[in-house]
Amino acid sequence: MKNRSRIVLLFILFTGFLTEAQAQNNSLLWEITGKGLKDTSYLFGTIHIRDKRVFDLGDSTYYAIHRTKALFGELNLQDKAVMKQHASELLMPAGSTLQSLISAEDYELVKKYCKKHIGMYALLINKIKPIYISAIVSEDLLKKEKKKPLDLYLQDYAAKRGNSIGGIETFEEQLAVINLLSVQEQADMLVEQIKHIDEEKKLMEYMLQLYLSESLDSLEILVQEDTLSQEFNEAILDSRNMVMVQRMEIQMKKQSTFFAVGAAHLPGTKGLIALLRKQGYTVRPVKRK
């Protein structure tokens, strides 16, 4: 169950052991300067949940957004036209349903749980890919006190201020990573998730506490400890991080930018902080309180 739960955590957080000295630099907000940049840019680790506890952003976060001219997320969630264009790619392949992939007993278990806990999304369990149902189930285990998850809120807030909004990845790129998991693997993961839902709920709260304490080192250990495969782990984090840094560089040279990406992308020797430093930038933590 552990590895399957942590795959879902990557989607909520998006989606090497640090020394004690590195752990002292834990922060969700980082300042990026140097290497000829005319203006300061910022990197912030976000999370895709609506629990009000993650919205205590601190004055420094708002100051950083106000100081910059653009806000870039992993995806441009303001571009509704592109999102609509790719909506069909969330659907199950033709001829496949969740019911056809799992046993009748497991299907009834999933159906009953979803009907009770995730509202109208329960009607879609045979229509959309199981990984998205898993993400909805996981998000439902935490409080939903805000209308929008944190990552979308930040883009909306910056857009209302007149900041440019963009994404450092495309929808095609994120969908390609998700599609590395077959629908059968996704279906099996969903079944295991529902069967161990109490364990999953504890894991979600533990993840949230690590996020609130800004413990990037511990978050990294949590998501790296077990994965479905090394190939998938590299695709969902390491390879994407390398592309992200290249595009961040291009954007920062154009204008000061606040980058808000999943917190799982920040830590580690292959994380965004380390990669930016290797490129010659000065990246330092900023206290948010």
Image (cartoon, grey):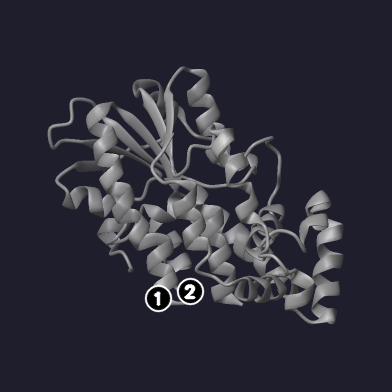
Q: Residues within 10 Å of mark 2 (few under 14, many from 20)?
A: some
Q: How many marks are shown on the rendered structure?
A: 2
For residue 269, above or below residue 272: below
Q: Residue at x 43, y 56 (%)?
A: 264
For label 2, the SS is loop
- Residue 240: % across, % down: 37, 56
For residue 264, above or below residue 157: below
Type of amino acid at the residue the image marks with label 2: Thr
Quarter location, residue 286: top left
- Residue 12: % across, % down: 56, 54
Quadrant including the N terminus: bottom right
Type of amino acid at the residue the image marks with label 1: Gln
Mark identifier at residue 227 = 2
Quarter location, residue 265: bottom left
Q: Residue at x 53, y 19 (%)?
A: 160
Q: Residues within 10 Å of mark 1 (few under 14, many from 20)?
A: few
Q: Residue at x 70, y 47 (%)?
A: 143
- Residue 134: % across, % down: 67, 62
Quadrant including the C terminus: top left
Please state if 181 lies on the left or on the right of 22 as rendered.
Answer: right
Please name whichever residue, 101 or 189, is drawn nearer the observer in this view of the structure: 101
Please state if 86 lies on the left or on the right of 256 as rendered.
Answer: right
For label 1, the SS is helix
Residue topped by disc 1: 230
Q: Residue at x 24, y 43 (%)?
A: 283
Please state if 10 lies on the left or on the right of 31 as rendered.
Answer: right
Please name whichever residue, 73 or 104, is drawn nearer the observer in this view of the structure: 104
Q: Let me know if residue 215 appears in the view.
A: no
Quarter location, residue 197: bottom right
The answer to the question of whether label 2 and label 1 lie on touching residues, with beta carbons closer than 8 A, is yes
